[in-house]
Image (spheres, rainbow, N blue to C red):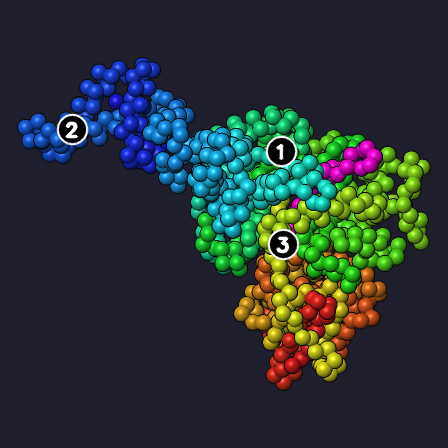
Amino acid sequence: MDPQPGQIPQVLELYLQISQYPILARRIRARMRAELFERGVIPQEQFEEEVKDKAVISQRREGLEDPFAQESIEVWRRRLEQIRDHLTDFYFAYNLPHTLFERIVRDVLADRAPESDVSLSFNPELAPPSILLAQAKKYASLPSEQREEIQHHLREITVVLTKSMISDQMGFVRLAKAFFDAEDFETIARRRIGEGKIGGKAAGMMLAWKILQRDGSAGSMDLQEQVVIPDSYFIGADVFYQFHAINKLDEFMNQKYKPQEEIEADYPAIQQAYLQGKLPEGMAVQLRKLLTEVGETPLIVRSSSLLEDNFGFSFAGKYDSFFCPNQGTLEENLEALGQAIRRVYASVLSPDALLYRQRMGLVDYDERMAILIQKVQGERYGEHFFPPLAGVGFSRNPYRWSQKIRPEDGLLRLVCGLGTRAVDRVANDYPRMVALSHPKLRPEAGAHEIRKYSQRFLDVIDLSENAFRTLPASEVLKQDYPYIRLLASEDKGSYLQPIYAPRTLGDAQVVLTFDELLRNQDFVTLMRGVLRKLEEHYQRPVDIEFTVAISNERPRQFKLHLLQCRPQSWREGGQGIYVPVDEVPRHDILFLTRRMVPHGQVRGVRYVVYVDPQAYDQAPSRTVRLEVARIVGRLNRLLEGECFILMGPGRWGTSNVELGVKVTYAEIYNARALIEIAQTETAGGPEVSYGTHFFQDLVESEIYPLPLYLGDHKTVFNHSFFEGAPNALEELLPNDGAYARYVKVIDIPSTTNGRRVDLLMDSVEDVGLAYLR
């Protein structure tokens, strides 16, 4: 019996696994043959006859016409053994289940050592995951005295399983090996579609939850009871390769080595190719099963690449995630889920992701995309599904709008509804910024500013429309919304007041202030405790994404649904930076600020790329504003290797061109600092980038984000310098001279007879100074 072409990989896989046990292989195959004979796959006599026939054929193939006369008995015996082994593997691979093979291996390993012997009898690095899992469970069941003896073996098995099933990033593995156990790996195996690792986002979520389960006390609060993770399913990273293979997409995998212009030009066609791709057949079957299990619960399909949420580079916002409302027929839901998966796969080759990899020195890494599928956390209210609270939490807070704020107590960005509005910079909307050391202290002052810089829209799942929607908060949150008192205040025009009797609100206007929530010490203690505990174990600052479920009972109970955790890029304060404010002549100061200053310095700045806030505000169209952002991108590429800073209006990276310059990471990554100019008449001003994915880009790329509040009486801004300096834009980009009104490139040495600019920032004294030296 000869193997068919399509069967080769199966027998090869079995052969490779047996080869991991060179000493025990003979006993393993003997047990395999016994199973073949006992189960009637092939009679023993017929099997041995086939062994001899093939042995003779092999001798003739090797040039021995009369093999019995010319080959010694010892060589003939070895030849028979090898043929017998090959036939054993072949018949077993294509007639009996692989689980039976795994059981045989376990039994042989167990037979080799008596029950009292707890030593490890095989190399964990070479063993199949199923064998490792079985051994880990066996160790876990031992009495405590014996468990102490094999703790080093169990730790090794945990490390190998972590590297093969979750993440092979060493920073993660070093921490994870103390927290994961056999039950965790079994859960992953049971809920994983395909093979391969589950990726960084899934890994970070699970590790953070395990840490809080193991070390779940924060003062008198029990975090074990109050922190959970959503029901989650995983698509292994190896499926990414299968998807490429069956759809012949491998030609695109060298995109990462192309120049930026080609990466950007090719991406639309790549997206279309991916969206038309076919999912692996087995994957489609398992997705159908998943949808049957979850019923009509909305889902979110999230990227979980091997590099994501790692120590030193988070890839925050580089890959896509998509909501699947899941309210159609099974076939409709399956199609929507498949499209979301394809779109996540396509985002691996997006310009932002590839240029980020180039910038971070990760272009040669084999980046595979795993996928995390989760039930959306929330509850139904009317026809809408959303959580009452969602947001992002940071264990360290450099966003200090008051000297009272303690950075080590952390920061929250809170929204009502789905958390997309907390992590991304969105148009005309602001999350509530919460300094956990002083949760009731706002960066804004007075009802006018609080109203202006509040959340106006909610992201929700519209169950009746089977769609993700963004709706005005006033349209969604009615007077009978059960948490309206916690989240909102009544708008009285000249002032905002707590909602005392929700049922009497009628058509009264409300503002999402979250004031009553932040007076609740249980909520603040929960968030502060979670962030502090995670930073303690990670031994560096972290950030999390979360939703919060609120009970209707009194007193209120809060349950945190942990969606993501990653180590945060953070510049430690280090030694103080001397900022010579009183020693620099006033005419040499470009700007001076004393609010929300990071810690660091940029010396020897040659170019300042300055987007004039007044001209930008008066731009006649959205098209002009978009082109301003593209010019910034072209300057970013042109000035690579030069020391330059960016300055311009409002919220850089926003999706609304009226609020700031709509750049992406790919258009600013060569800059050394980004100064966001807030044109407000008061010191409160609009919220800057801190806490968004865009801010993480700046920090990880060592680009200092610095807000400049022109309405603050402590701010100094040298208008005459910026207005009078020559503009080098047309010299650098001859085709963009028409936009010189909006974008000015100041060549500092040319303008100041060889001088350059130093930007010095001291977060302790909260002072930043840019001056000519």
- Check disc 2 and give the amino acid type: Arg
Q: Which residue is mark 2?
A: 77
Could you tell me which residue is drawn at 49 percent across and 55 percent down? 362
Residue 234: x, y in percent?
55, 36
Q: Which residues are magenta?
A: 542-562
* Residue holding disc 1: 231
Find disc 3 in the rendering and name its residue: 541
Q: Quick check: 638 above or below 153?
A: below
Judged by its main secondary structure, the magenta piece is: strand
Identify the residue at horizontal 86%, vertical 34% (top origin): 480
Q: Residue 407 in the image: x percent, y percent?
A: 71, 58
Give the number of the mark in front: 1 or 2.
2
Q: Report the residue at 17% width, 30% height from top.
A: 79
Q: Is residue 403 above or below residue 178?
A: below
- Foreground mark, 1 or 3? 3
Query: Vertically, is 331 above or below 162?
Result: above
Q: Earlier in the sequence, mark 1 or mark 3?
A: 1
